[in-house]
Amino acid sequence: MLRTLKSKVALFLKNIPSVDRYLHNRYQRKRFNTEYRLIKGTHQNDNKHPSIIYFSVNKAATQYVKSILQRCGVENRMVPVGIHEYAFNTNFPYLDLLSAKQMGKYKHIFKETGYLYGPFGGMIEGIPNLDRYKIVLVTRDPRDLLVSEYYSVAYSHVAPSMKGNKYDVFKTKRSRTRELSIDEYVISESGRICDIFARYQSLLLDHFANAYVTTYEYMVFDFEAWLADLILYCEFDVSPSVLEFLITENMHKKPKKEDIHKHNRKGQPGDYKEKLKPETIQRLNETFNPILTRYHYNPSSMDQEAANH
């Protein structure tokens, strides 16, 4: 009886817009307590490990790599910070879409020691003293990236909170994506992906030698070596039990068959060769030529990656 009454009262309150907004904001502040306190300038952390900023390109196993970094970071008493995820579910802006001037009001979020930031799907301008951070950039063959993104946007990616300002944009993009063929989608979005890579090059890699660049392909082909290199760069002290857990988990994560409705749909490099028309691949090769050369994806991502590692 009491439980039923509480449910009715909760439902009644949720139907009052002002109360619903208050409850939503309280829930998000509790869920993203660290992020909220950093934004407000009240979070403190005495860990002296250099902070890590994890940049990537969406659909380069961003959430999986985040889980690995967080597992290792927490063991080293670092504080994970998911500013992008907070923005995804609220009205807070995506920091990688702001100019350096606009970022000025948020630069206090980034502290040089003790924090693990990311993932971010694009370069952020205006972070002070970026040379004092550990910077991880994970890339992926842009042709595979676009194929994976098509299925994610159209079918598998979870929608943001309906209470934030990203929901309508997400639903509109999902609807429009489903109206396109995969070839139409990858061509229409190729310019945006070029811009993301170009910003990483001009704003990060051309200026900060401390940035560590690794690839999705390296992770897939030789996970243990990829993980060892990542841990070494980040200067993590990782226990044998955590290391064993990460390696065992990776073995079980590989999908046995393709499912377009799952977040981890297929994951094999070179998937674009099966999904796209030859003329589409040719057009993407021309568009992405500087990127493919810079990140060693020519002539074949798999062959080149095997040669590199």
Image (spheres, rainbow, N blue to C red):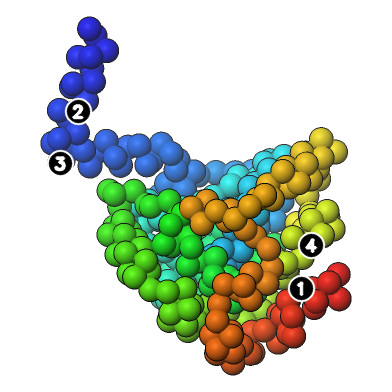
Which residue is disc 1 drawn over? Answer: 302
Let me know if residue 160 appears in the view: yes
Which residue is disc 3 drawn over? Answer: 17
Location of residue 278 (image quadrant):
bottom right
Q: Secondary structure at mark 3?
A: helix
- The numbered mark, 2 or 1, whose residue comes first in the sequence reads 2
Q: CA distance from mark 4 to mark 1?
A: 9 Å
State left or right for residue 102 relative to residue 129. left
Q: Secondary structure at mark 4?
A: helix
* Residue in front for this viewpoint, 179 or 216: 179
Residue type at the position of mark 2: Leu
Which residue is disc 4 drawn over? Answer: 221
- The numbered mark, 3 or 1, whose residue comes first in the sequence reads 3
Let me know if residue 192 appears in the view: no
Q: Residue, x 41% and y 36% (percent of image)? A: 30
In this rendering, the label closer to the viewer, 3 or 1: 1
Q: CA distance from mark 3 to mark 1?
A: 53 Å
Crowd class of label 3 (few under 14; some 14 to 19; many from 20; radius 10 Å): few
Residue type at the position of mark 4: Phe
- The answer to whether marks 4 and 1 mark residues whose Cβ atoms lie closer than 8 Å is yes
Q: Residue, x 63% and y 52% (percent of image)? A: 257
- The numbered mark, 2 or 3, whose residue comes first in the sequence reads 2
Q: CA distance from mark 3 to mark 4?
A: 51 Å
In this rendering, the label closer to the viewer, 2 or 3: 2
Which residue is disc 2 drawn over? Answer: 11
Q: Position of residue 42 (x, y in %)?
A: 46, 45
- The numbered mark, 4 or 1, whose residue comes first in the sequence reads 4
State left or right for residue 222 relative to residue 281. right
Q: Which mark is residue 243?
A: none
Residue type at the position of mark 1: Met
